[in-house]
Image (cartoon, rainbow, N blue to C red):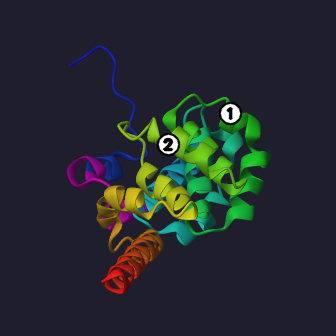
Amino acid sequence: MGLFKKKPSAFEVSAKTLAEKGFCDEYIDALKDDISNALKPRDINKGKSYLCNALIICGRLNEAYDVFNEVDLNTLDSILAPNLVQNIIFSLFVQDKLSAADELYYKHNRLVLHDHTDSMRRTLAIHEHIQGRYENSITILAKMLDSDCRFLDICIIKSMVKLDMYESASEIGSSLNAYDGLHELGNQSMKLKRKILNALDGSRIKRTHKNKKKK
C-alpha cells in the first residue's frame, strides 16, 4: 500500500464506463447516476459540465443546452469552464441558432479568448462565419484540420457551403458520416450532405445540358 490513500471520486462508475466504451448513451446514463449520488455541490456542478459535453459529443444538443443552463461556470476550473462554453457555442452554431451562439460568445468573451486551445480557435472561426466572413472562417479551420479538436469538419463545410465551394466541401464531406444517427447533430450533418449532393448534381446536369447544346 502507498502512504497516501487515493481520494474517492464522485464519478468512478461513469469514468470506468467512459474508459471501456467511450462517449455513448451508456456513459451518459452512468454519469447521470453519479451526479444524482454526488453529495458536494461542486461535484454536482462539475458532473453537469461533464454531462453537457458528453451530450454534445453524442449529438443530443437540445438536452445539452438545458443542462448547460444549470451549470455555474464560476465554480468550474480554468479548463472545464471555457471548454464547456466553446462546445455550447458550437452546438448552437451547427443548428443555425446563430444569434444565440454569438450572444454567448460576447457574454463569455473573456472566458473564451483567455483559452488557448484549438477549441477557442474553432470558436473564433464560428464567430467569423456568423459575421459573414466565411473566407476567414475557412482559413482558421483549414490550419487546424490535423488537430484532435472535434467538429472541425462540420464547421468548415458550413462555411464552404456558404461560398458555394461544393467540390471542396465534398472532399471533406465523407467525414460527416461519423455523425450519422447522432440525434440533432446527425440531422444537421444529413442536411449538409444533402445540400452538397444536390448542388453537385445540379452542376453536373447543367454541364451535360451545355455539352448537348454544343453538339
Q: Residue furthest front?
A: 215
Q: 10 Å neighbourhood of mark 1: few (<14), some, or many (≥20)?
A: some
Measuring from the top left, give residue 63's x and y in whole percent: 54, 70
Q: Amino acid at mark 1?
A: Leu
| Magenta span | 17-32
Q: Is residue 40 visible?
A: no
Measuring from the top left, give residue 182's x and y in whole percent: 37, 70
Q: What distance separates the C-alpha of mark 1 from that of mark 2?
A: 16 Å
**Which residue matches tag 2?**
141
Measuring from the top left, give residue 127's x and y in whole percent: 67, 49
User: Which residue is found at the position 45% from the left and 49% from the top?
Assistant: 152
Of the 4 image quadrants, the one containing the N terminus is top left
Secondary structure predominantly adopted by residues drawn in magenta: helix
Q: Is residue 110 found left or right of 7 in the rendered image?
A: right
Is the residue 78 above or below the residue 24 in the image? above
Q: Residue furthest top?
A: 3
User: Which residue is found at the position 61% from the left and 39% from the top?
Assistant: 82
Q: Is residue 112 found left or right of 140 in the rendered image?
A: right
Question: Could you tell me which secondary element the residue under label 2 belongs to?
Answer: helix
Question: Could you tell me which secondary element the residue under label 1 belongs to?
Answer: helix
Q: Is residue 47 magenta?
A: no
Q: Is residue 80 found left or right of 128 in the rendered image?
A: left
Residue 163 quadrant? bottom right
Q: Is residue 185 visible?
A: yes
Q: Amino acid at mark 2?
A: Leu
Label 1 or label 2, whichever lies nearer to me, is 2
Q: Is residue 25 magenta?
A: yes
Which of 188 and 139 lies nearest the eye of the viewer?
139
Which of 208 and 114 lies nearest the eye of the viewer?
208
Is the residue 53 above or below the residue 210 in the image? above
**Which residue matches tag 1?**
113
